Every structure is written in C-alpha cells, then in structure tokens.
Amino acid sequence: MAARMAKKKIDTEWQLRPTLALRPLGGDHARRELSEIADAAEQDGLPRLAAFLAGQGALQELLAAIFDLSPFLRDTARRRPAILDKLFDQTIEARLNEIGEAVDRAARADNVSESSLMMELRQFKAEAHFLIALADLSGEAETALTVRRLSDLADACTRAAVDFLLLDAHGQGKLKLPHPEDPARGSSWIVLGMGKLGAHELNFSSDIDLVVFFDPEAPAVVDPLDATELFSRLTRRLVRILQDRTEHGYLFRTDLRLRPDPGSTPLAIPVEAALRYYEARGQNWERAAMIKARPVAGDLASGSAFLKELQPYVWRKYMDYAAIADVHSIKRQIHAHKGHGEIAVKGHNVKLGRGGIREIEFFVQTQQLIAGGRFPELRGRETVPMLDALAARGWITADARDALTRQYWFLRRVEHAVQMVADEQTHVLPEEDEELERIALMLGFTGEAEFAEAFRASLQQVERHYA
C-alpha cells in the first residue's frame, strides 16, 4: 500500500498534462527503451526519475510510445535525463520561459567567447526542442503553440548571436554602440526573418531565412566606407554561430538567399541601396516574400522603419492582375521541380506537393497582394489569422476559411511528425510501410490505413479550394 501511495505521489508531481494516448511500433521494444532511460537517470543521480520511469501507468506508457516512435527524442532523453527530471518541479511552459531568458542573457555573460556561446546556445536549443516536441506529441500543446514556441526560440538564439557580435565589434573599436548595455538598439544592423520565421510559423527542423541590411550613416558606424565589409563579415560570423555543426549539434541552418540579387550583392546591404533595388527591380515573388518579413534581431526599430518604407512597394492601391499570374507561375515552377504529381500518400511532399501547405499559403498570399493595398487589415504575416481576415472581408467564404484552417494545422502536424523522427529537415512522407505506420502512430491514428485516408481527404480539400 505504501509503495502504491509513493508511486501515486510521483505521478501527480510530474508536470506533463497529455491529452493523447499513443501506441508504440513495438510494445516490448518500447518498454525496454524506457528501462534504458531509467538506468541512465539512475547513473546520473536522478532517483525520483528512475523510479518514475520504472513504474506503471498512463504517463509511462505514453513516454515509452513517444521514445519508440522518435529515435531523436529517445536519444536525447538517454543522454540528458535531467531534462525529464526538471518536469517534476516545473511545467514545460515555465522551463521554456527560463530557457528563453537564459538565451537572452548569454551574450552578456562574463568571459563569453564565440565558442562558449555556440556551446551554450546549442545545449539550450536541444533541451527546448525536446520539450516542445514532447508537449506536441503528447497533445499538451496545440500545433499553433508549437510553431510559436519554435519561432520564439529561433528569435532568441539569433538575437543572442547578434548581440554578442555587436559587443565584440564595439570592444574592438569597429563600431561605437550608443547603448552597449542593450547592444542592438541604435546599432543600425537590421536582421529580418522571412518566410515561416517571419510569420512565427517555424517547423520543427526548419531552416531560417534571414535578410540583412544596415545604415552606413548611423552614429554607431565608425567608418561608413568600411561598413559594407564590416556588416558582411559580422553576418558571415552570425551564420557560422547559428548553423555550424559541433559536438553539441547545430542551432538553425540559415539561408540568406532571399536578399536582393543574391548572386551579386554582399551578405549585408545598405538600406538605401535595398530600397532603390526594390523600387526599380523588385520581382513579384519578392513582394510576396516581404509579406512575412519581420525584424527578429539587431536594431528592431530600424528594421520596422525599413519595412514601413517598403509598404508602397509591397501593398499597391491598384493591383496588377498580371502580378498574380506571375506569382502563380512561381507555384508552377515549384511543381515542375518538386515532382508535383498525383495525390499519393507514400513519398508525398507535405509542403510542396499537391494539396500541401504551400498551396494554402499561396491561396492566402495571392489574395493579400490583390486586396492588401486597399485594406490594411489584410497585411498580416500569419496564415490562419489572414484566412479569418479574408473571410471577414468577404474575399473567401466561411466554409473555405474553416476547411483550410483545419487542413493547415493537420498538415503542419504531419510535417512535424516527419521531422521529429530524426530531427531532419524533410517534408516527404516515407515510402516504407513501417515508417509510414510510425508517422500514423505519432499522430494518434490507429495505423497506416486510417492515416492515409485522412491525409488524402485533406489534400483533396485543399486542392479544391486552391483551384
């Protein structure tokens, strides 16, 4: 009786609040894996976690299933069982907030170096990713919260790296920061997040798209003639801090190719040159891309001012329908290059394939480009709130809004499951039966057949509305 009461006490203390019960691929195998994580907890001096994992109950069954379905999460738990142990004392939300605050402080720590910052940020990111995935797969967090948490984490890591580099340049006399205690403020270094990062819609193993500008005439700049070289060098180091793979992993693969004319421009572009480019030579796909642009690091006020200056370029009072045809031609090019074929399940690209996530995004963005010049409420970055706004304006039906909202979040869950298996940046469903079964079980389906039926129905519904 006493043992049962002690067991109950441990269970109620653990802070995860799941809403889903998942089934593992192999029951015996899953229990063996959980036992190995319990052994790792014992070896790391975490007796309450070891006792909890060795126990019987719904939480243990859920963890066994999650670790069986996701080798990435299983290996993280085995290497760092203390991440699980902390959940006796605080919720996932509370711990993620703590990690965010620690990341924000990291650049200003005493004796911080580039290598020590890289190590610290990677360790924080690995813990945060584990917790975000655990909350998502257990059903504790809705997908909308998952993408926000992933985006906030990327923002914080990028901010920390930028602040470190600004302080380093200030210490070497290459910049004269007006507010060293808040290095980014007034620095004139503008780092815009594009795509899913800009929209707070990052996926689990996402690249981040950044575009970098600066003002060579800002007070922080010591030598305006050297500014392009200086900020390009800092940007190169920023990419290295974020994406280089070390013994502690990587932070975020980083793509700078959305900047103006990437084949012939420096990594960091003067603000005036960028404005002239967009005004004279900007392409319609660049206008569409700028819908989601958001200052994520560096001089946030200068970033917001830059985007405000760009508004007449992005949001035109009288929409040229030829521009919409141009945007749709981009979609056709994507289809041609990405094997946009029949609606299948095995091997289907959840993002770029027929009826996929990209079709919902294009559905929203093309109508934003048509109507956003006249109606400022249609200029938002996030996909689902803009479906709401388009319906409120009568541009789409309430039925289209509800259907596409439902399918958007369903397809995002599928995308996350595919990536949570091994923390790989992929959007393609597996070809093998067992691996497809794994994805189905991660999403709470009874098996591959039930998932395949729901997935096909989702793609067909998106395709109907997009057409």
Image (cartoon, helix red, strand yellow):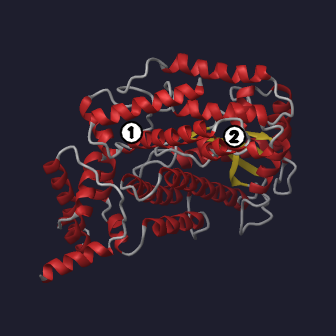
Above or below, comparing residue 382 to residue 49 in the picture: above
Answer left or right for 138 relative to 369.
left
Residues 141 and 289: in front is: 141
Q: Which quadrant: the C terminus?
A: top right
Q: Residues within 10 Å of mark 2 (few under 14, many from 20)?
A: many
Q: Which residue is mark 1?
A: 418
The amino acid type, in three-letter code, at marker 1 is: Val
Residue in the image at 86% along x and 30% along y: 318
In the displayed structure, does residue 270 sit left or right of residue 243? Answer: right
Task: Tell me, yes or no, if residue 310 can be seen here.
Answer: yes
Q: Quadrant of residue 256?
A: top right
* Residue 45 appearing in the image: no
Residue drawn 50% across and 49% down?
251
Q: Quadrant of the N terminus?
A: bottom left
Q: Spatial distance from mark 2 to mark 1, Cα to Cα?
A: 30 Å
Residue occupied by mark 2: 390
Residue 97 lies, in percent from the top left, at: 52, 67
